[in-house]
Image (cartoon, helix red, strand yellow):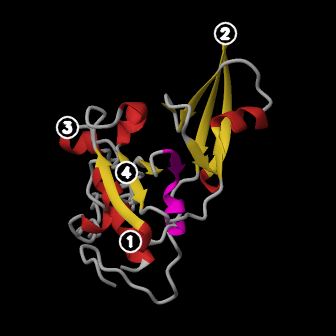
Amino acid sequence: MRASQFIMLLLITAGCLAGLPSWAQRAAVAPLMPLPPVLQSVLPAGLGEAAKTGVAVSPTAPVTPAATATRPVLPEPVYLLDAHIILGPNGLSKLTPQDIAKVDIYKTAASTPAPWRSLAAHGILSITLKPGAKHRLRTKSLTRIQRQLKLTGPVIFQLNGLPIESASLRVATQAIAGFDVLHHDAEIVVNIRLVPYRPTPLPPGSIYIRGVAGR
């Protein structure tokens, strides 16, 4: 399996974890048909509608064009590598499919191992590499992030708003979009924002047909 096919398979799985069908699998939408013109009677000067029919007629409001369908924004599951590295979806390209031993999918908090249970709101996709396989990811520990932000004292960490309960987790450096530091009384909360998925741009002339996996 090529790396691009493997990444696409994982992203499709992530779409299933979100509980909604992927955009490509949705039923085709019928084209929008133009609305027929609204015909209004033109009365002679000085003769109102109420005088002619006995019924007051409000002017017809202009028709607002139907909004163009947009791609829905789905929540991303959490990607874990070897049970301790938090990946962003863009980090999947750093993995070699032949180095992967197994992929575990956790859809609910009840089925998720205790150290990650607080991160399972949108599902967790855990990737385990084969013994001896190495990745090319640079990572940061939560302690290093705290030192980078020059914070002292106890710090509560979150991942995209979800609480991180395991202090042993590390975050891939390229997956970090930024930090939100919040002060609540004596507590300091650091929310780690991940870089959202950015699909690889298609080459000019590429055409995808909705509902068809191939190009």
The quadrant of the picture occupied by the C terminus is bottom left
Name the mark on residue 180.
none
What distance separates the C-alpha of mark 4 from that of mark 3? Answer: 69 Å
What distance separates the C-alpha of mark 1 from that of mark 3? Answer: 71 Å
Name the mark on residue 185.
2
| Range of residues picked out in magenta | 84-94
Local packing at callout 2 (Cα closer than 10 Å; few below 14, some 14-19, many 20+) is few
* Residues at marks 4 and 3 touching, judged by CB atoms closer than 8 Å: no
Say left or right for 94 vs 130.
right
x, y percentage for residue 170?
A: 58, 43
The amino acid sitting under disc 3 is: Gly
The residue under label 4 is 125
Q: Earlier in the sequence, mark 1 or mark 2?
A: 1
The residue under label 3 is 54
The residue under label 1 is 6
The residue shown at (30%, 82%) is 214
Q: Earlier in the sequence, mark 4 or mark 1?
A: 1
- Residue sitting nearer the eye, 205 or 200: 200
The amino acid sitting under disc 1 is: Phe
**Image mark count:** 4
Q: Earlier in the sequence, mark 1 or mark 3?
A: 1
The quarter holding residue 209 reads bottom left
The quadrant of the picture occupied by the N terminus is bottom left
- Residue sitting nearer the eye, 131 or 124: 131
Q: Earlier in the sequence, mark 2 or mark 3?
A: 3
Whether the magenta-drawn stretch holds residue 88 is answered as: yes
Say left or right for 199 vs 109.
right
Whether the magenta-drawn stretch holds residue 201 is answered as: no
